Amino acid sequence: ARAEASAMLRSKRSVGISRLATMLPTETTSPRRTLTVRTRPSKSSNCTTTSRLTAAWTFTSTPSDAGPLPLSTVRFHPKLTPTGTAPAGRRTTIPLSLQGPAATDLKSLTVKVSYDAGKTWSPAPVTTTHGKRTLTLTHPENARSVSLKSTLTDTTGNTYAVTIRKAFLLT
């Protein structure tokens, strides 16, 4: 779902998402940075999934660092119907992938699932087989949506945390 009300937040200041590259101060006393992105569909949107997405990266970077920022992400790849749903009351395996430094230098990865739009969370163990990561969920019969939350840390201590409310719907 396309989030039309995106904003980048840093130090309690809202900045347009297109200014991500210019957000890091050139002078600082600490090389630790935190960037947070929050999205939600606009009120005029017909979007029924991803009612809110929050992602936060904490990483080390100095003004003299050249190259890309050390930002990693977790991507979930559920197999959904053409209408973007999965069946309730069934067991589902969801492949997931890592991008950025954590893809090859992962220290830790946790995933949690919610079936009540993020009010309560349960651990969702990640399984790795032949280098492929998956999580297997059994959706309750009465659940109507799946929300996902994940935190990863790479071997240099950079972190990424994401919460996707209503990542997909159940029917």
Image (cartoon, helix red, strand yellow):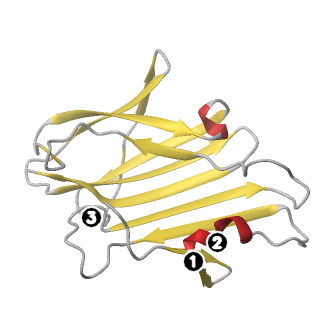
Can you give x and y, in whole percent of width and height, for residue 123 in the image?
Answer: 38, 45
In the visual, does 75 lie left or right of 33? left
Instruction: Identify the residue at horizontal 54%, vertical 47% (top origin).
Output: 73
| Residue found at the very far front of the displayed protein | 18
Q: Secondary structure at mark 2?
A: helix
Labels 1 & 2 near each other (Cβ < 8 A): yes
For disc 3, the marked residue is 117
The residue under label 2 is which amino acid type? Arg
Image-quadrant location for residue 155: top right
The local secondary structure at tag 1 comes to loop
Classed neighbour count for the residue bearing mark 3: other residues with Cα under 10 Å, few (<14), some (14–19), many (≥20): many
**Disc on the earlier residue, 3 or 1:** 1
The residue under label 1 is which amino acid type?
Gly
Please report contact status of discs 2 and 3: CB closer than 8 Å, yes or no: no
2 up-or-down from 131: above or below: below
Residue picked out by circle 2: 19
Residue at (24%, 74%) from the top-left corner? 45
Q: Position of residue 74 (x, y in %)?
A: 49, 44
Left or right, 28 with respect to 78, comes to right
- Select label 2 or label 3 by which is in front: 2
Residue 152 appears left or right of 60: left
Q: Earlier in the sequence, mark 2 or mark 3?
A: 2
> In the rendering, which numbered label is found on residue 16?
1
Q: Quadrant of the N terminus?
A: bottom left
